[in-house]
Amino acid sequence: MRENAGDSEVEEESSVDEAEMSLDEQMREARLEGGGGPERFQTPAAPPEREGRPPRASASRLASLARRLSRVAGSWGLYQVQQRLMLGTLPAKVLGYFLLGAPAVALNAVLYRHASGRPLGASLVQSFGNLYHFPGTTVLNDVSLAATCLNVVLYFAGTLTFALILGVITEDLNGRYQRIRQGSYPVSATGHTLILGWSRLVVPLLRQIETAQRCRGALQGPVVVLSARPKPDMDAELAAALPASTLDLATRPGDPASTLAVDRAGGARAARVIVLRPDDVEGGAEAHAADEQRQIARVLALQTARQSALRDLHAAEGAGRRGRRALQRLAPLIRTQTVVLQTPAISAPEFADGAAGTETREALPDSAEPQPASPAAQRSKSMLELLKRGAAATRQSLELDELDLAGGISALLARSAAEPGVASVLASLLQHTRGGAWLRVFEPGSEASGLVYGEARRRVSGGVVLGALLSGSRRVARLNPPEDETLEAGAGLVVLARGNNLRFASGSSNSSAVSGGSDHAPGEPDASSHKAWFGPPKSIVVLDSGVACGDSPAPSGQLCALLAHLRAGACPGSTVTVLGPCRPPGARADSDDAEDSGESSSKSDDDEVTVRYIPGSTDDVHALVSTGVADADAVVLLGQAGSTPGWSGSGLEADAELVSSMVLLQTVVSQSAGRKNPTPLHVLGTLRRPETVQVANHVLSQLSAGHMTAELLQPDELAAGVLTQVSADPRLRPVLNGLIAARADGSAIRLTSPQELGIDLNQELTFRQVQETARARRQTVLGLIGRDGSMSLAPAGSEQRRYHPDDRVILLC
């Protein structure tokens, strides 16, 4: 009884001690549960036990502490399992699946061994197969009822474990699938072509890249498009527009001005980068300056990503074996990256620095004179200069695509109106076509140093030499130079060829040299006026269906550029009749009667081209008849899509407008009493969608009955062709700009008959003989257009043919 009473007293004292736990002890236990709190919560060691306390009280406290520690350890272990299963990688989750069931397998194996009497190894295999549902293991009808019960319990536990890990892995796989759909994973390709931005040029640009890869062997590698649009939208649009494409194409969503997005698209490792400008919108110079600033931000993001990769490359070079894999991945950084920056388009009123120069300024009204550049535009220009200097530090070659699409198309339309066929030839030179010829820069090396142009030209086989490209930091193209001009050291030759079999013969050429054919200085044009090529005066009708004058801050801007080119290039005595809602800039009335009737005209004293204006709608048949279109030589169709800078607008609406105008023209021509002009009416215009070409061809072949011919240009395809050729060889940029601009002091494409060139029609001649005949007049023959309309550029020098009077020889003069 005494011992029992003593025990009760000890237990009562222990309970009191536990109930009256000191603050230090509570903080110590809280620290153990928290797993590493701040240092200020750490307390000194517990005070020593009071003398006379029985050992049983200490054991009770230790048991309580052990229970608390077990709870903490269990929570920590469960937390670690959750982290590994939910946030780990897929291999870690699969490994965690097997490790999670390892205790159950071991425990069940021990129990199964006692229940069945089998060895421990066989028991482990049986338990492992039941838990993870491997075929071949026995669940029912085991050696004993206890063993069967253990199999069934473990089998159901395996079902629950499998469901758990299946849910975890499925979530991980769904996340990866979503990342694939959204394009949020990085591009692993190197040496590829990267397109930054999205515009209507993306699809034509991809078509041109595919043609260049197939026919020319250029721009090899995958193509990546980085745009702020959602990836499903980009993939759907590209799949619909390029159903049979063989390009290795990838799309990535993201802001092209973001360094992270550019790096995810492999911008640092790309061989070439094309920075597209957004589709043109109205807003004048300020809007163009804003577009240019966005372009600058994209180039800065690209340079930042490449600079970071270059630092990784330098670090890997000194890392020994560990850096070999990094060196292989970053190897493209050693080569120079070509960056083609498409600058914002220039509106027609600002076209004074373009192809027509002074003539365009004179054609503009006083209110439309070009204004000084805005502060934003000046700031953008200064930043562009900084980008050029910064490109050297990142091993980049920055090329500015300053193609003025609106002015360039106006020049092509005007030149083909005066001389049908020129626009088709230039379109073939600016684009990559299957089976066609393309421009390239051929470097003969030191063998051509000191030679005159005529000798170097004759030594090249496999193509037609158009001119020379001067060496140096500022590339200058000299197209159609004199035969006696001496080539500088390191100069390249601009060649038009069909294949890659260009050769430069050593020693003197076998062909007999032809005299220079010109006593002029290298930069001086031929003495004969370029207007003599256009033959007799032409009657040209311009149908301007643009917006009303009050709806545009620069009315008839495209019309202004077109008239400037017609004044500069049409034959003296030609007449240009304009039908539209707006009076042409600079037009004045010839007489009071003409002014009262609403008809006005103007005549330039320099080029003697008469401009008549008739107000009215292009859909009015009576207004069309009053223009004299039934007997005109050419008709230029200007739609609403061309009234805004960059020829923007809806492609479907613009193409439908052009096709309906062609049908209306055919109606007017067929209903006329009789066409006095012996040649068919030549129709010129622009198309946005390639599929509209088939509809236009149907109108010409089935409805026109031979009364009309047409040259329908595709501005987007031409711009994409220029971007592709500059990306493949940046040295071609001055060559292409020279062909498009056709300045008065430069070279231009002309068409002539074999008789005017002095070709004998009674014998077969090789193409090389025709070339030498033209070079005697300081002209370069590029090919010919047969009487059936087929075009042949850069034929073989040994190709023989008998020329027909209706053939037209393509000249660069």
Image (cartoon, helix red, strand yellow):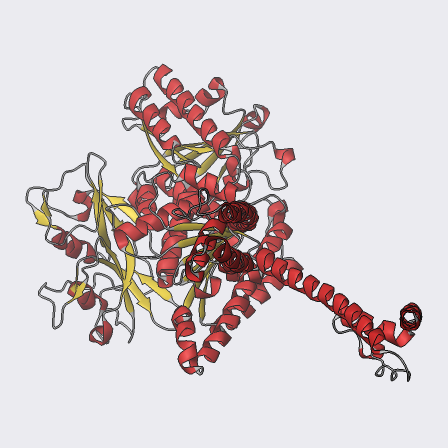
In depth, the one of 340 and 612 nearer the eye is: 340
Rendered residue at 54%/42% (across/down):
557
**Vertical order, 798 against 397 (above or below):** above
Q: Is residue 812 visible?
A: no
Q: Residue 784 at x, y = what percent?
A: 21, 44
- The image quadrant of residue 576 is top left
Q: Residue 558 at x, y = what percent?
A: 51, 41
Q: Is residue 712 left or right of residue 197?
A: left
Q: Is residue 304 left or right of residue 526?
A: right
Q: Is residue 757 visible?
A: yes
Rendered residue at 32%/28% (across/down):
697
Q: Residue 508 at x, y = what percent?
A: 11, 71
In depth, the one of 220 and 180 nearer the eye is: 180
In depth, the one of 69 and 762 nearer the eye is: 69
Q: Residue 200 at x, y = what percent?
A: 48, 43
Rendered residue at 48%/57% (across/down):
113
**Vertical order, 271 against 617 (above or below):** below
